[in-house]
Image (cartoon, rainbow, N blue to C red):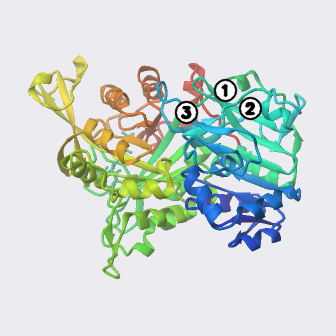
């Protein structure tokens, strides 16, 4: 197999990139020291997390000059995400850190007054009007009507003509009213702000074109009018709750208000095998797949957690982001008796192919401590340590709120939501507040959901997975009041979860709230709807979605 060299200096999910490279027929060799750079013919610089953190590691390890020499020698070079950002002159994220200056310009933070930041999801890398390309040509396999997976808070604003004057060809994307650089290329250099290794077939095509040296290709078809529909798509996530059943097999299950045992037989519901179900949803066009280990590897030695194997297998064939939740906290290795910090648990997950970790119970405990300490950050929580090492985008907090009905907002100090007439409480209560729970709903905290989400945002969480125990498994639609109140409280993206029963519920949550993504479980597992069917309905009704590419 032909080889490509990868720089082994960053924290993050490098596993996905290795899997993607192998999928397109190349083998990875690692660069472990600056001296190794000279051996590389094709070199990829991945990067996640903070610009300053990445660049400083990179500078301190002595990589700057060897990389510049590689580029100046005309050898193929590709930067991904922070690997693209490193090529610019600097970033508002860390103004004192100097970039490589290969590409002119600086990165700015997205404006969060009218949209969620970070941007997480599928957006364009549009070359339809790129200077230097004919209408029927593609740059490294990029197609104007394809969508690519982005996750970032800082971007290079696109200023027409500026980079082009220096000989760069630019693919652009639009987030809200901001146009930014999605990818740039010149001679032997390609850099993408998006993650091609997480962008399905569209992303694999870019990696292959770079490795094959196919700078300019012919587009299979002239870009459709859809190409002009730039912007972030509505994100549909398939969620798999995983646990061991009574026979000892790890299965995908599904609860009704978190009760996963069948009413008649009292056996754990078995809806299928985790890896094959994840592959099925990928093929149906799911934009992300989430695994929740709902029994959090009780008594399992960390090194052979079955969830790690599930991730390893899934990440070889599923090229969209994978989130894993359950048991991300400081934990005791049952084999050695040693305490393993949450950061190490997360690292195991990332090394096995996860892109994000989801934290449930531990986030509630951390938020309780945050308020007891007068909103002081300890720096030691799972959220903070993982976010500092891997970036906020890698940390999801999964919230399991439960309604507490009240007759009026004055009846409680907590933030309340007015219920719709058909949702009143058992005694006709017209309001409720949402109590946070831990341990899969078995323990209830005094914190309300708004307190929790604001605390975890302050700690550096990048995204909220907003479940609702009252709605889970009911097929009655998402809890719109809950979603609106959480969206109003935070700037980070929010994923709506619990209650989806048909495509109309997805349409409703996107049209009637400003939620960033929506997740379904039971309706997909029971085969009532496919992800593709949901997306077809959304598209027919004018909502922008990512079409699956084979
Ligand atoms: O507390 O960090 O160990 O994480 C445990 C994780 O497991 C949490 O994210 C928690 O939400 C989840 N969990 C724990 N027990 C259950 C259970 O069901 N008994 N599942 C559970 C949570 C809820 C959603 C579900 C949606 C959509 N599952 O993920 O997929 O409600 O369902 P629907 O579309 O069928 O309505 P920790």
Furthest residue in direction front, as rendered: 96
- Helix, strand or loop status at disc 1: loop
CA separation in Å, label 3 and label 2: 19 Å
Which quarter of the figure is the C terminus placed in?
top right
Q: Are marks 3 and 2 in contact (CB under 8 Å)?
A: no
Residue 154, percent from left and from top: 58, 40
For the point 78% across and 35% down, the residue is: 170
Residue 84, percent from left and from top: 69, 48
For the point 59% across and 21% down, the residue is: 540
Residue 201, percent from left and from top: 70, 46
Question: What is the number of the mark on residue 461?
Answer: none
Q: Are marks 2 and 1 in contact (CB under 8 Å)?
A: yes
On the image, which quarter does residue 458 sit in?
top left
- Helix, strand or loop status at disc 3: loop
The residue indicated by pointer 1 is 230
**Is tag 1's residue or tag 3's residue first in the polypeptide sequence?**
3
Please tell me which residue lies in front, 383 or 265. Answer: 383
**Callout 1 environment at 10 Å: few (<14), some (14 to 19), or many (20+)?**
many
Which quarter of the figure is the N terminus placed in?
bottom right
Residue 219 visible in image: no
Q: Are marks 1 and 3 in contact (CB under 8 Å)?
A: no
Q: In screen coordinates, is 169 left or right of 534?
A: right
On the image, which quarter does residue 4 sit in?
bottom right
Question: What is the number of the mark on residue 126?
Answer: 2
**Is tag 2's residue or tag 1's residue first in the polypeptide sequence?**
2
Question: What is the number of the mark on residue 110?
Answer: 3
């Amino acid at each position: 197999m032909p080889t490509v060299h990868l720089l082994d200096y960053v924290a993050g999910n490098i596993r996905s990139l290795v899997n993607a490279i192998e999928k397109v027929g190349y083998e990875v060799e690692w660069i472990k020291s600056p001296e190794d750079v000279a051996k590389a013919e094709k070199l990829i610089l991945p990067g996640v997390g903070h610009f300053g953190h990445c660049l400083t590691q990179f500078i301190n390890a002595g990589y700057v000059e060897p990389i510049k020499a590689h580029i100046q020698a005309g050898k193929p070079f590709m930067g991904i995400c922070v690997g693209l950002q490193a090529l610019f002159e600097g970033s508002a994220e860390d103004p004192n850190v100097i970039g490589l200056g290969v590409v002119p310009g600086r990165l700015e933070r997205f404006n969060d007054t009218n949209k969620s930041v970070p941007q997480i999801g599928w957006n364009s890398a549009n070359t339809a009007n790129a200077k230097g390309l004919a209408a029927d040509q593609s740059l490294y396999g990029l197609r104007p009507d394809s969508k690519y997976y982005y996750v970032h808070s800082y971007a290079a604003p696109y200023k027409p003509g500026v980079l082009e004057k220096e000989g760069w060809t630019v693919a652009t994307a639009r987030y809200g009213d901001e146009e930014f650089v999605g990818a740039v290329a010149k001679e032997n250099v390609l850099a993408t702000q998006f993650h091609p290794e997480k962008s399905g077939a569209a992303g694999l095509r870019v990696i292959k074109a770079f490795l094959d040296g196919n700078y300019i290709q012919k587009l299979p078809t002239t870009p459709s009018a859809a190409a002009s529909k730039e912007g972030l798509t509505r994100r549909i996530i398939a969620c798999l709750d995983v646990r061991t059943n009574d026979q000892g097999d790890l299965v995908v299950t599904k609860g009704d208000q978190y009760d996963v045992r069948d009413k008649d037989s009292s056996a754990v519901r078995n809806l299928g095998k985790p890896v094959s179900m994840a592959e099925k949803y990928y093929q149906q066009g799911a934009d992300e797949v989430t695994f929740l280990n709902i029994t959090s590897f009780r008594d399992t030695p960390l090194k052979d957690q079955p969830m790690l194997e599930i991730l390893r297998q899934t990440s070889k064939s599923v090229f969209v982001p994978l989130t894993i939740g359950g048991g991300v906290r400081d934990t005791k290795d049952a084999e050695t008796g040693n305490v393993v910090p949450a950061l190490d648990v997360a690292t195991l997950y990332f090394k096995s192919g996860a892109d994000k970790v989801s934290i449930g119970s531990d986030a509630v405990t951390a938020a309780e401590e945050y308020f007891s300490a007068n909103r002081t950050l300890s720096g030691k929580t799972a959220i903070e340590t993982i976010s500092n090492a891997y970036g906020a985008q890698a940390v999801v907090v999964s919230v399991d709120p439960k309604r507490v009905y009240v007759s009026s907002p004055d009846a409680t100090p907590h933030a309340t939501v007015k219920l719709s007439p058909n949702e009143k409480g058992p005694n006709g209560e017209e309001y409720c507040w949402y109590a946070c729970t831990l341990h899969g709903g078995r323990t209830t905290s005094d914190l309300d959901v708004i307190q929790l989400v604001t605390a975890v945002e302050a700690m550096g969480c990048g995204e909220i997975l907003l479940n609702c125990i009252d709605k889970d498994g009911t097929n009655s639609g998402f809890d719109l009041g809950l979603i609106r109140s959480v969206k109003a409280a935070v700037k980070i993206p929010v994923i709506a979860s619990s209650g989806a029963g048909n495509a109309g519920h997805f349409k409703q949550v996107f049209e009637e709230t400003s939620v960033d993504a929506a997740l379904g479980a039971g309706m997909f597992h029971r085969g009532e709807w496919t992800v593709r069917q949901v997306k077809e309905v959304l598209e027919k009704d004018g909502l922008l979605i990512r079409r699956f590419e084979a």
